[in-house]
Image (cartoon, coloured by chain):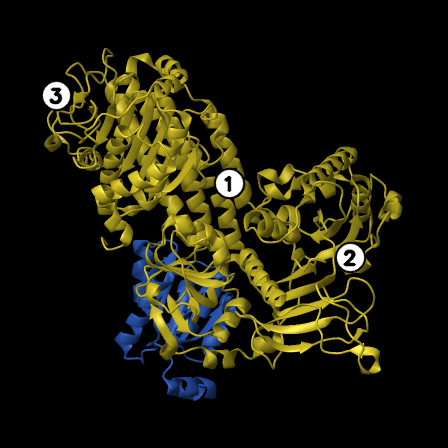
Chain colours: A yellow, B blue
């Protein structure tokens, strides 16, 4: 620690400067250890590690324990000023213990959930059909309907005293659904097998057209024989399916098997059908089975076996005879042929067939295993998914033939590339499509193998469409790897030669082996599907996902927001971040001139665009007092930031042009800034340790924060940057935020923007990379400060972005040559 | 012992494919390791039930045995003892959630070649198998 403060530092009890500094360092230690553990859990999700239940328990409890210690230390610094943080911690801890004990999670008490609140980890509560439609539609942007779920809890409650409340909630949910849909519509309802052990089968179906008839249908489900399969359920039919439901008595307890109901909009149908994503036939390579027919009548369906690999050519088809005069969707009536029937015309066009195949594969990836999609083709020729179920057919012949599988596996001669790190395990095949930061998601075919030079966070928006992802630069610990795991897209990073793969060529990626094969390796795809190599199907992986949901997301972003309080902490990461921010605030307030304790911050004696005081919390500065030069700065992250800050050529020497409008626009903000903290207005402070820096800048009326740990271990390293406020008018502030966002994304940050608040986070870096990033942030800070009111149009944003990139050398980094 | 080798095992030996038995009572470990080693060119049998694995090793010899130490029903060390009694030259890799000095000492006395601690990377355990192959002069699979 050394003598960080004045000579008066004698006491080490609570409240003393020495105690505060020591406690602050403990918060930092807990923070970095917790982040490391989170990163390990996240990498395990990608298939990089083989783990067991003991790992899940120890990892989750370690993070939880570190979170608690962080909250404890913050309260130590703040004289128990954040006791609410313990309540937040207990909420998270209870959620984690619930997951570890096999419970259904914190939403287990909810009876009705709209699709927008349903995530993949809620399958025990709402069943596969609800999870599948919610994830495919709301999360992945695929053509799945809006809807809501009556949960296991809601269905169980219908036989109790809460029945009327639950029915009211359901009616309200359906009313909201109609509002979102723009009016009343036909609803499809399915009773779904759910619970922790539920396989997700659809047990019964019904239709409804109003909140009342939907409630009646659900009551009929609850009262009916749940063992009746498929369309034969007691609720079959339209109109008034509830006639049988009233026979049930509220007091009678139901079958113990958990069930849920899926209620969703049913689009108008010209053709209906199903797609089974993995179909057995001993005479065909792995295939999908597509079945389609007209919605009314007993006609035989068309059936088509499709290749599981793009472009999904038909492997076999049986097209049913159709009556003369039948209209095909989007087409004309069939002409009369011999025997008054027309043979050879299918209900679906080849393009629609291929789209369905890709939707099936996307669903399979998202849900972690083969499944059956139900779909409709609308009169306008649009494909819409209407339901999802697991496949129930066993494959005994293939299992028995496993010996042959081994012989058929591709050999080394078929490998195009190998190496790299597993970002997400699994096998995927498709055409090679080069992607970069500027690629638009819609331009990437579903199921493509995306290849990129660098695993940039900007590629995250494309991931849900990919069948596999390869990058030459990047690690399994990066943000893009996290997104690949979230979407279960097989991914290999750090794979040399990936960007040189021929666009359009067909390849198979086996991420578990770090290998890319020429062509489509059907045997690998089959093995992956059959043997559960899609690790998302394993219970351990589902538990891990659910644990991470309560651990990893960072919801608190803006410390100036009124929501930045303990009550809004919902994850371990929220609590860790909140505690860290508040601890920094406490140290900063102690460092203000005139206060006892830390004493005077030491002035930076360099040609800086603004005055900066530095507080040493351990190994950050040489010497014990007096002005500081760059040579005295021993904190690695702070020195890197200052080196960037002091770069000459990115600073604009000419004074920024001010106009009367700018002055008037800033008046409203002026009073807020002045009233916020008069004592520290105009004072810029840095807190520095050997491997840590926090730089808080109040430049006139903007606020900028850089918070960084640079460690030999990438898991400990992170850089956080925040910029808010400013004197210019609204448009110029928005443009400056745009400039910052552009540059941060090019620097590899995961950056977000809300108005003129810009937040960037980057973590899990090697030390040299982190230091280089901090130099750029220093340069960016100086640059942005100077040009505040120069951004008079969006053209200027692009212009100044380019000038900054050129002057700071970042354009070289962007082109990838710097690596 | 040569009389006990089944025709299938003899055929495999002739093809130069190293044979591996995996034993871990957690199904997920077997599900991850079996396809991984198959795709790397090995012949693999995986068991979650120690009794079944024990019965299998009395029927044929494996070049490498990978076993967890801590399992319900049968102690991993007892299983190792049986394997080594039957086939002294079989290579052994032990999977453990913890490695204490005493466990390590006793395991080495039973002929353990390598330790892998959970959670482990697939590459780690593949390296272990390849070291055994090199040490014992077995044909390299890849």
| Residue holding disc 1 | A96
Q: Give how far across and how far down residue A151 sits, in percent.
A: 68, 43
Q: Quadrant of the N terminus of chain A?
A: top left
> Which is in the foreground here, disc 3 or disc 1?
3
Q: Give how far across and how far down residue A754 sits, in percent.
A: 44, 33
> Which is in the foreground here, disc 2 or disc 3?
3
Q: Secondary structure at mark 3?
A: loop
Q: Secondary structure at mark 1?
A: helix
| Residue holding disc 2 | A227
Q: Which quarter of the picture shows residue A68?
A: top left
- Chain letter, disc 1 residue: A
Give yes or no for contact between labels 3 and 1 (Cβ–Cβ under 8 Å): no
Give yes or no for contact between labels 1 and 2 (Cβ–Cβ under 8 Å): no
Left or right of A197, for residue A743: left
Q: Earlier in the sequence, mark 2 or mark 3?
A: 2
Q: Which quarter of the picture shows residue A202?
A: bottom right
From this viewpoint, is residue A168 visible?
A: yes
Q: Earlier in the sequence, mark 3 or mark 1?
A: 1
- Chain letter, disc 3 residue: A
Left or right of A121, for residue A79: left
Which residue is at the front of the view, A502 or B125?
Answer: A502
- Chain letter, disc 2 residue: A
Left or right of A282, for residue B96: left
Q: For residue A625, which numbered disc appears in the image?
A: 3
Marks 3 and 1 on same chain? yes
Mark 3 crowdedness (10 Å alpha carbons): few <14, some 14-19, many ≥20: some
Q: Please report the residue visible at 82 percent of the width from the left and 52 percent of the height from the top.
A: A235
Q: Which quarter of the picture shows residue A492?
A: bottom left
Q: Earlier in the sequence, mark 1 or mark 2?
A: 1
Q: Is residue A410 above or below residue A528?
A: below
């Amino acid at each position: 620690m050394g003598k960080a403060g004045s000579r008066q530092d004698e006491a080490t009890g609570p409240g003393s400067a020495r105690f505060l500094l020591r406690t602050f360092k403990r918060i930092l230690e807990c923070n970095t250890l917790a982040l490391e553990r989170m990163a390990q859990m996240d990498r395990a999700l990608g298939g990089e590690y083989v783990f067991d239940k003991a790992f899940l328990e120890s990892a989750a409890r370690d993070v939880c324990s570190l979170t608690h210690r962080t909250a404890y230390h913050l309260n130590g610094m703040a004289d128990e000023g954040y006791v609410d943080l313990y309540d937040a911690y207990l909420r998270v801890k209870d959620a984690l213990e619930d997951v570890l004990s096999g419970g259904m999670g914190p939403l287990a008490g909810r009876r009705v959930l709209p699709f927008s609140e349903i995530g993949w980890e809620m399958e025990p509560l709402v069943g596969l059909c609800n999870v599948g439609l919610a994830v495919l539609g709301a999360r992945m942007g695929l053509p799945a309907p809006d809807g809501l779920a009556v949960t296991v809890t809601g269905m169980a409650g219908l036989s109790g005293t809460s029945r009327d409340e639950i029915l009211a909630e359901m009616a309200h949910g359906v009313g909201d659904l109609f509002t979102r849909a723009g009016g009343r519509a036909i609803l499809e309802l399915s009773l779904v097998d759910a619970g922790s052990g539920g396989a997700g089968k659809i047990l019964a179906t019904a239709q409804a057209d109003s909140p009342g008839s939907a409630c009646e249908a659900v009551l009929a489900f609850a009262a009916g024989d749940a063992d009746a399969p498929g369309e034969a359920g007691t609720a079959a039919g339209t109109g008034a399916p509830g006639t049988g439901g009233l026979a049930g008595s509220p007091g009678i307890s139901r079958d113990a098997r958990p069930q849920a109901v899926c209620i969703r909009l049913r689009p108008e149908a010209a053709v209906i059908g199903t797609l089974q994503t993995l179909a057995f036939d001993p005479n065909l390579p792995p295939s999908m089975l597509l079945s389609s027919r007209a919605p009314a009548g007993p006609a035989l369906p068309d059936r088509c076996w499709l290749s599981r690999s793009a472009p999904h050519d038909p492997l076999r088809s049986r097209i049913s005879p159709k009556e003369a005069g039948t209209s095909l969707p989007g087409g004309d009536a069939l002409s009369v042929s011999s025997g008054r029937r027309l043979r050879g015309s299918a209900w679906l066009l080849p393009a629609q067939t291929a789209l369905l195949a890709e939707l099936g594969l996307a669903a399979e990836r998202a849900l972690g295993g083969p499944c059956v999609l139900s779909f409709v083709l609308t009169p306008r020729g649009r494909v819409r998914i209407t339901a999802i179920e697991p496949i129930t057919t066993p494959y005994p012949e293939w299992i028995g033939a496993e010996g042959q599988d081994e012989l058929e596996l591709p050999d080394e001669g078929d490998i195009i590339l190998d190496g790299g790190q597993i970002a997400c395990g699994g096998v995927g095949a498709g055409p090679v499509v080069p992607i970069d930061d500027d690629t638009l998601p819609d331009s990437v075919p579903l199921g493509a193998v995306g290849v990129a030079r660098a695993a940039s966070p900007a590629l995250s928006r494309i991931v849900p469409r990919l069948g596999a992802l390869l990058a030459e630069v990047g690690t399994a610990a990066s943000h893009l790897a996290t997104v690949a795991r979230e979407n279960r897209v097989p991914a290999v990073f750090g794979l040399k030669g990936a960007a040189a793969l021929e666009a359009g060529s067909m390849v198979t990626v086996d991420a578990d082996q770090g290998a890319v094969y020429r062509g489509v390796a059907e045997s690998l795809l089959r093995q992956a599907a059959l043997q559960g190599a899609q690790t998302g199907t394993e219970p351990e992986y589902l538990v891990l996902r659910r644990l991470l949901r309560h651990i990893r997301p960072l919801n608190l972003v803006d410390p100036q927001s009124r929501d930045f309080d303990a009550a809004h902490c919902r994850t371990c990461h929220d609590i860790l971040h909140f505690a860290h921010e508040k601890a920094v605030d406490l140290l900063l307030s102690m460092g203000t001139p005139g206060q006892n304790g830390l004493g005077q911050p030491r002035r930076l004696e360099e040609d800086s665009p603004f005055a900066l005081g530095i507080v040493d919390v351990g190994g950050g500065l040489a010497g014990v007092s007096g002005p500081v030069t760059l040579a005295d700065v021993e904190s690695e992250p702070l020195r890197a930031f200052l080196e960037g800050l002091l770069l000459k050529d990115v600073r604009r020497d000419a004074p920024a042009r001010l106009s009367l409008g700018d002055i008037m626009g800033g008046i409203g903000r002026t009073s807020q800034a002045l009233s916020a903290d008069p004592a520290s207005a105009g004072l810029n402070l840095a807190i520095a340790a050997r491997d840590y820096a926090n730089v808080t800048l109040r430049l006139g009326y903007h606020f900028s924060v850089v918070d960084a740990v640079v460690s030999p271990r990438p898991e400990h390293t992170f850089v956080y940057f925040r910029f808010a406020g400013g004197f210019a008018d609204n448009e110029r502030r928005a443009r400056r935020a745009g400039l910052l966002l552009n540059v941060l994304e090019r620097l590899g940050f995961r950056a977000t923007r809300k108005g003129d608040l810009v937040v960037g986070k980057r973590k899990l870096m090697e030390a040299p990379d982190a230091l280089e990033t901090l130099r750029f942030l220093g340069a960016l800070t100086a640059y942005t400060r100077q040009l505040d009111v120069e951004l008079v149009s969006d053209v200027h944003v692009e212009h100044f972005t380019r000038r900054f990139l050129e002057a700071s050398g970042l354009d070289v980094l962007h082109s990838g040559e710097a690596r | 012992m040569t009389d006990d080798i089944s025709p299938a095992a003899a055929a495999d030996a002739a093809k130069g494919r190293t044979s591996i038995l995996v034993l871990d009572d957690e199904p997920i470990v077997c599900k991850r390791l079996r396809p991984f080693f198959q795709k790397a060119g090995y012949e693999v049998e995986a068991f979650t039930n120690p009794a079944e694995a024990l019965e299998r090793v009395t029927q044929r010899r494996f070049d490498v045995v990978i076993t967890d130490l801590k399992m319900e029903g049968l102690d991993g060390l007892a299983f190792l003892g049986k394997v080594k009694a039957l086939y002294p030259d079989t290579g052994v890799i032990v999977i453990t959630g913890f490695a204490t000095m005493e466990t390590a000492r006793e395991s080495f006395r039973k002929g353990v070649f390598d330790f892998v601690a959970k959670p482990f990377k697939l590459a780690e355990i593949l390296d272990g198998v390849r070291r055994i192959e090199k040490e014992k002069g077995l044909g390299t699979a890849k």
